[in-house]
């Protein structure tokens, strides 16, 4: 298959004003400028001067696990029976027929992180998935791409205020994290020594302790962000900060740490105290200081299909356009550890490609075609 005659945004390999991309058996085989394209007589799609780019990525969503129009019966985000549930897997709560999946895919969003919610200090395992397929097995890229942990108001409200048990304070949140992470280290030592032990919650934390996957910390306020970083250093964890609402207070820290925060959702009102500094200026402030950023809609807080609009708002408020394209593609892929497969146009990567009839960030732009693993869905 060839898509041609459009402005090709590869993300990592340049921009071609008149470009093409070829793919076969679900993988990209060639791309570049039209005037260098080899002869081709197979099936083709004329982009008609539109924009061609890799499928969009949001690394922090609750799509499929907080189902549209299903109320409480379709909400499987938070197993709020215990403040620490690392053995819970988001993939086991996903409904592949959530109407939001089709709407988001038709807007060009193809890869997502499906996350447990933030009621628990340790919420469970984040799944990297594609928004195409009849079963979660078909959709899954990485069933456990990261562990979800949460700082701040949400665990305090759920347990301290809602149930009258720990965590009532930020101190307790940090203490619970240290307790579980220390126990996971001890458990790993037993396993490494050949002991036959099996504890589901500790098994879930082993890849994190061993540096195989990161932790994604829900954290809005600067003090919570700093605590998450402190604990990550104590246990030598790979990490990302999700939301990073108060990041403007500690920009030098983000630059020095070199991690990619997932900023957002900033197209919504401040529903709680820790979101008071919520603003689309945050991605630009971070980027101008030298930090890379990803953008999140936090679907279902705001609709996932508005991800291009989120990028456009950030550009309007100071984020470089090139950085905005990275923020909704490759940087989200990196946060999920799937950038070897998705997030840019490159030979050998999955043929997840979107064709727009205009600039992707423009609100009048329509999606003309969507390909997932080389199969056309729109």
Image (cartoon, grey):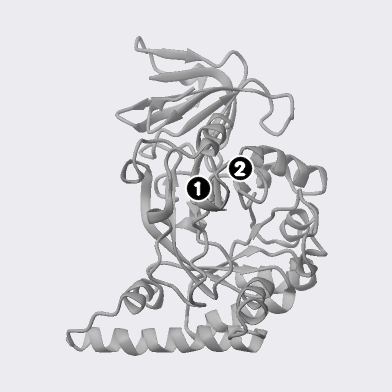
Q: Secondary structure at mark 2?
A: helix
- Mark 2 Cα-neighbour bin, 10 Å: few <14, some 14–19, many ≥20: many
Identify the residue at image location x=74%, y=69%.
251
Circles 2 and 1: CB atoms closer than 8 Å? yes
Image position of 358 with respect to 220: above or below: above
Q: Which residue reaches farthest top?
A: 41
Residue drawn at 73 percent across, 72 percent down: 221
Rounded to the nearest angstrom, the CA distance separating label 2 from label 1 is 9 Å
- Residue 22 disc label: none
Q: Position of residue 356 (x, y in %)?
A: 61, 24
Q: Secondary structure at mark 1?
A: strand
Q: Is residue 251 visible?
A: yes
In depth, the one of 303 and 33 nearer the eye is 303
Q: Quadrant of residue 156?
A: bottom right
Q: Is residue 99 left or right of residue 247?
A: left
Q: Measured from the top left, where is residue 220 in percent x and y?
A: 70, 68
Residue tagged 2: 304
Q: Which residue has dot 1 on it? A: 112
Instruction: Locate residue 231, reporting x and y percent.
Output: 56, 83
- In which quadrant will I find the N terminus? top left
Q: Compared to 2, does 347 lie above or below?
A: below
For the point 64% across and 56% down, the residue is 293
Where does residue 351 sit, x and y in percent of width and height? 41, 33
In primary-sequence order, the first of circles 2 and 1 is: 1
């Amino acid at each position: 298959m060839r898509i041609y005659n459009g402005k090709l945004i590869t993300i990592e390999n340049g921009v071609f004003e008149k470009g093409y991309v070829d793919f076969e058996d679900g993988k990209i085989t060639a791309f570049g400028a039209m005037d260098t394209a080899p002869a081709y007589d197979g099936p083709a799609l004329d982009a008609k001067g539109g924009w061609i780019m890799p499928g969009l990525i949001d690394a922090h969503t609750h799509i499929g696990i907080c189902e549209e129009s299903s109320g409480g019966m379709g909400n499987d985000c938070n197993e709020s029976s215990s403040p620490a549930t690392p053995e819970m897997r988001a993939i086991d709560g996903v409904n592949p027929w959530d109407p939001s999946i089709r709407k988001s895919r038709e807007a060009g969003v193809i890869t997502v992180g499906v996350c447990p919610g933030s009621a628990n200090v340790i919420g469970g395992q984040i799944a990297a998935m594609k928004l195409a397929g009849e079963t979660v097995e078909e959709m899954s890229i990485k069933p456990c791409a990261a562990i979800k942990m949460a700082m701040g108001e949400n665990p305090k409200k759920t347990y301290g205020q809602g149930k009258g048990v720990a965590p009532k304070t930020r101190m307790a949140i940090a203490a619970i994290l240290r307790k579980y992470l220390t126990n996971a280290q001890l458990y790993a030592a037993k396993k490494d020594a050949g002991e036959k032990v099996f504890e589901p919650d500790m098994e879930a934390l082993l890849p994190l302790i061993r540096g195989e996957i990161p932790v994604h910390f829900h954290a809005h306020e600067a003090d919570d962000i700093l605590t998450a970083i402190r604990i990550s250093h104590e246990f030598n964890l790979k990490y990302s900060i999700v939301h990073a609402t108060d990041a403007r207070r500690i920009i030098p820290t983000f630059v020095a740490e070199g991690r990619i925060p997932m900023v957002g959702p900033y197209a919504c009102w401040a529903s709680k105290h820790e979101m008071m500094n919520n603003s689309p200026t945050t991605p630009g402030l971070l980027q101008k200081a030298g930090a890379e950023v990803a953008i999140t809609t936090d679907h279902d807080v705001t609709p996932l299909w508005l991800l291009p609009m989120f990028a456009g708002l950030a550009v309007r408020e100071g984020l470089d356009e090139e950085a905005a394209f990275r923020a909704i593609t490759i940087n989200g892929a990196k946060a999920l550890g799937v950038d070897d497969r998705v997030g840019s146009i490159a030979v050998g990567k999955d043929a997840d490609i979107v064709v727009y009839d205009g600039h992707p960030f423009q609100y009048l732009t329509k999606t003309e075609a969507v390909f997932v693993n080389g199969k056309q869905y729109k």
